[in-house]
Amino acid sequence: MKAYELLYFVAPNIDEDTRANVTKRIETAIAQGNGTIDNVDNWGKRKLAYEINGLNDGDYTLVDFHADPASVAELDRVLRITDAVVRHMIVKRTDRD
């Protein structure tokens, strides 16, 4: 398994139930691919560099995990169809393998 880092943000005015559902969906997608989550770091509300979909702020979360490349593609697909996630980025971490 390879080490990856996922950074995503949701709208800052989203309710906690929806935010918890997004986190649960990410955990489920990683677990279904036999991956493991190493660390979840909630960065909180941050100002965006430019306006996205009428938003000037975002509520960021960083997730460190290990997974197979095929399951990372599935996680990317799940994040793209999740309406609550405004933007996301998955990066392979070669320094943590």
Image: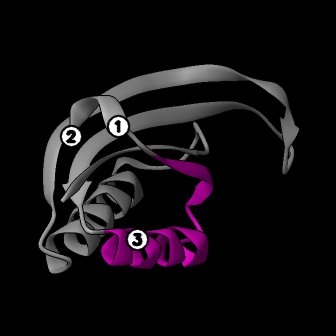
- In the rendered structure, the answer to whether residue 3 lies left or right of residue 93 reads left
Q: Earlier in the sequence, mark 3 or mark 2?
A: 3
Helix, strand or loop at mark 3: helix
Number of numbered discs visible in the structure rendering = 3
- Dividing the image into 4 quarters, which one contains the C terminus? top left
Residue 76 pos. (x, y %)? 50, 69
Residue occupied by mark 1: 94
Tag 3 and tag 2, C-beta contact below 8 Å: no
Q: Amino acid at mark 2?
A: Asp
Residue occupied by mark 2: 97
Q: Nearer the viewer, residue 54 or 4?
A: 4
Image colouring: one colour
- Dividing the image into 4 quarters, which one contains the N terminus? bottom left
In this rendering, is residue 1 above or below 52?
A: below
Estimate the spatial distance between the alpha carbons at disc 1 and disc 3, rounded to whole Å: 19 Å
- In the rendered structure, the answer to whether residue 87 lies left or right of residue 38 reads right
Q: Amino acid at mark 3?
A: Leu
Residue at 25% across / 53% down in the picture?
2
Q: Amino acid at mark 1?
A: Thr
Residue 79 belongs to magenta span: yes
Q: What crowding class fits label 1: few (fewer than 14 Cα within 10 Å), some (14-19), or many (20 or more)?
A: few
Q: Which mark is residue 75?
A: 3
Q: Which segment did they paint magenta?
A: 69-91
